[in-house]
Amino acid sequence: MKYGFAERVKYMKSSAVRDILKIINQGNIISFAGGLPEESLFPVEAVDKAFHKAITTNNKTLQYGETEGGS
């Protein structure tokens, strides 16, 4: 599939975060950088329970809603 991006996309540079994550995700690096918590500590069961409750008790959970903000 061919995408039609704006001309300015050709000049975009990679971000530092993207470059760091690319190296870390190779699997042979232990990162002490902030923002990369140990995955085994993620509260997967609690998130699953909360998601299930939200998706089954409100028919509009996945619907767009109003946004807050000034005009």
Image (cartoon, rainbow, N blue to C red):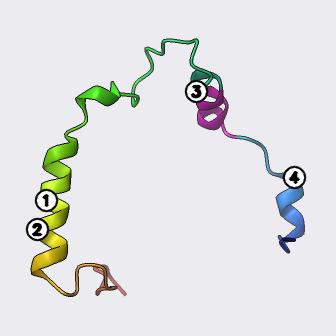
Q: Mark 1: few, some, or many residues within 10 Å (few <14, many ≥20)?
A: few
Q: Which mark is residue 66?
A: none
Secondary structure found at label 4: helix
Q: Which residue is mark 4?
A: 11
Left or right: 18, with 66 as reference point: right
Give the CA separation, mark 4 to mark 1.
42 Å
Assign the magenta stretch its main secondary structure. Answer: helix
Q: Position of residue 60 (x, y in %)?
A: 22, 86
Where disc 3 sits, the SS reads loop
> What kind of residue is marked 3?
Asn
Q: Quadrant of residue 5?
A: bottom right
Labelled pair 1, 2 in contact (Cβ < 8 Å): yes
Residues drawn in magenta:
15-22
Which labelled disc corresponds to residue 25? 3
Q: Residue at x 83, y 71 (%)?
A: 3
The nearer-to-camera label among 4 and 1 is 1
Q: Of the residues shown, which amino acid type is indicated by label 2?
A: Lys
Does residue 50 sit above or below 2 in this rendering? above
Mark 1 → mark 2, Cα distance in angstroms:
5 Å
For the point 85% across and 63% down, which residue is it? 8
The mark found on residue 50 in the picture is 1
Q: Which mark is residue 53?
A: 2
